Image (cartoon, rainbow, N blue to C red):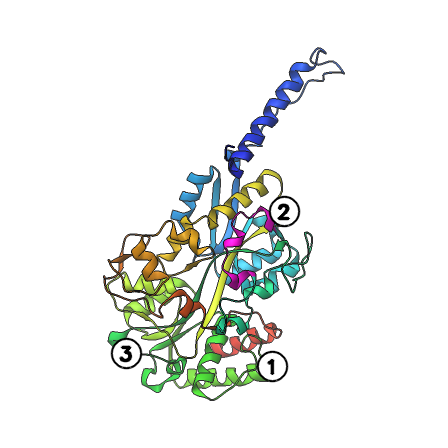
Amino acid sequence: MTKITRRKLIQTGLAAGAFAATTRCAQNPAPLGTPNNPAQGPEVNTNQIADVTLRMIGTGVSQINEIKEKAEEDLGFKLELRALSTEENNQIAITQPDQYDIFDGEYFSLPLVVPSGNLQPVDISRITDFDKIVPIFTTGSLYDGAPVNTSQGTSPIRVMYVQGEDSSEFATEATGWATLIPFQYNADTLGYRPDLVGRTIESWAELFNDEFQGKTSILDIPSIGIIDAAMVAEAMGIMEFADKGNMTREELDQITNILIERKRAGQFRAFWKTFDESVNFMSSGEVVLQSMWSPAVTAVKSQGIECIYAPLKEGYRGWGGGIGLSRNLSGIQRDAAYEYINWMLEGWVGAFLGRQGYYSAAPENARKYMSEAEWAFWYEGQAASEDMVDPFGKTLEKAGAVRDGGSFEERMGNVVVWNSVMDEQVYLVQKWNEFIAA
């Protein structure tokens, strides 16, 4: 039996619809313009996949022109990208659902976005490779005994499912309806310049070390920056948290006081909100140790500057991103959106982002588009058997290098906390603003 792809089915369906309309006209014996065969007004056939344009909002991490162009080539419809800060992305998702068709967001944002009712649940039966998605997202476990299985914060599994087709309430177990379909994620940590630091960084506590006074930076996104600060405080032994991803008011007061004290002592060179800011701080040498994202580390390396994404003994802070659908999507637009989600999991995108250090939600699919050397380096933690090149053609690592932190299991398995929205989120933002303004 000939295999028919979903995209082919859409196009076939459109052709069949056009044929049926033509046949109906041909079978009508009444003269055109009479009551039994009224004349039709001008008709614009928008029911064509090539006419579809999907408007996407997301952060700059994945709003990449090369991915957009490849998707348009493979899928046959248009995409409009809109790169926003994390806060802007969430705000538009919550308040302006008519401004987007696809929401490219992070799981930690969902406790804010989903209750608005502006995302329509994703029908899992329409996701071709859902069974290939790593279990961190679908069951909450990676392997027996992995710290990530009991991690704190907004673990993706806590916000992965909703209760039904029209629901905006999270489900505590798997259902047939998802909030987002994941496509990328990673284990975040501190980045540093080994040539300027002069030794190996092994603990989050180093961020507040007087040795680096005036040369450190922390991420200025309250929900993430406060967790990095908590990792530092715990590593220093000056605070303990029941759940770093859901702090009490008393804990927020205490960690904010610590941050303000360190700021007034001159610990921080600056704070960063965007990818480019973090790259510029590190590549210029103004900052030698800071919160970083994996592509920012690769961007620094691609300039020929040493930069290490430190595997720290206390573990990693995890994050995950996925694709959601605006509640306003329907018809051929929604069909196209499902095509796009399936394409994102098919493997090409996973391999593209993997060359920046991100992981694919369906790793075995990504592997089809990676060389054996790339797979061994990025996922298995083996020494590079050849130079590692990023998606834009720049050499990141020379043959013989080993990925910072090792294999996929070593890195993702040691995520101890996830980016989070807390019960005291409003109070958190208030306290964080006090810190930034101090």
The mark found on residue 249 in the picture is 1
Q: How far across and how far down the image is residue 410, in percent?
A: 40, 70
Which amino acid type is marked by label 2?
Answer: Asn
User: Are the residues flagged by discs 3 and 1 in contact, CB closer than 8 Å?
Assistant: no
User: Are the residues flagged by discs 3 and 2 in contact, CB closer than 8 Å?
Assistant: no
Q: Quadrant of residue 253?
A: bottom right
**Above/below status of 319 relative to 19:** below
The mark found on residue 197 in the picture is 3
Q: Residue at x 32, y 85 (%)?
A: 211
Q: What is the magenta range?
A: 123-138
The mark found on residue 328 in the picture is 2
Chief SS of the magenta region: helix
Residue 87 visible in the snapshot? no
**Above/below status of 234 relative to 339:** below
As measured in the structure, the alpha-carbon distance from the residue carrying label 3 to the one carrying label 2 is: 51 Å
User: Are the residues flagged by discs 2 and 1 in contact, CB closer than 8 Å?
Assistant: no
Q: Residue at x 32, y 57 (%)?
A: 374
Q: Nearer the viewer, residue 289 or 429?
A: 289
